[in-house]
Image: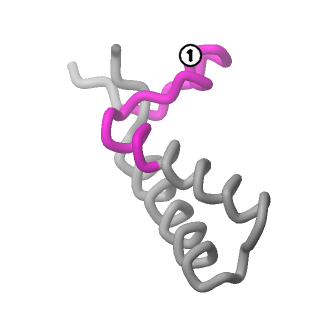
Amino acid sequence: MKKNMGTTDKFIRFIIAAILLIAFFTDALTGVLGYIALAIAAIFILTSFVSFCPLYTLFGANTCKIKK
C-alpha cells in the first residue's frame, strides 16, 4: 500500500477517534449509535497507523507530502 495520508490528516483522525471513544465510554453515545461511533473510531485509528485511506484511492485524493 502506498501512503496517501499526511501528518495533519492523521492528527485530525486521532482527535476525532478520541472524541468518539470518550463519548462511547462515558455513555454519551449508547446503543447502535454508540457501536457505530466505536467502529468509526477504530477505522480512523487503524488508517492513521498505516497512513493509508482506501476512500482516498477511490476519489484520487492524497494528503501526503511528496518527497523529492
In the rendered view, would you say 8 is above or below 60?
below
Q: Is residue 17 found left or right of 7 in the rendered image?
A: right
Report the magenta stretch's main SS.
helix
Callout 1: 10 Å neighbours few (<14), some, many (20+)? few
Q: Is residue 19 above or below residue 43?
A: below
Q: Nearer the viewer, residue 10 or 21?
A: 21
Q: Going 61% across and 25% down the picture, which residue do you hit? A: 55
The x, y position of residue 6, in whole percent, is 39, 40
Considering only vertical position in the picture, is 23 above or below 40? below
Q: Relative to 27, is 51 above or below? A: above
Stretch in magenta: 45-64
Snapshot quadrant of residue 65:
top left
Q: How is the image coloured?
A: one colour
> Which quadrant would the N terminus be assigned to in this image?
top left
Q: Residue at x 66, y 82 (%)?
A: 27
Residue 24 is one of the magenta-drawn residues = no
Q: Residue at x 74, y 72 (%)?
A: 30
Give the image location of residue 56, x and y in percent: 58, 24
Q: Nearer the viewer, residue 52 or 66?
A: 52
Please indicate whether residue 47 sits to the left or right of residue 57 in the image: left
Outermost residue, right side: 32
Residue where numbered disc 1 is placed: 57
Q: How many marks?
A: 1
Residue 46 place in picture, x, y as percent: 40, 41
Q: Secondary structure at mark 1?
A: helix
Give the residue type at disc 1: Thr
Q: Quadrant of residue 51?
A: top left
Residue 59 part of the magenta segment: yes
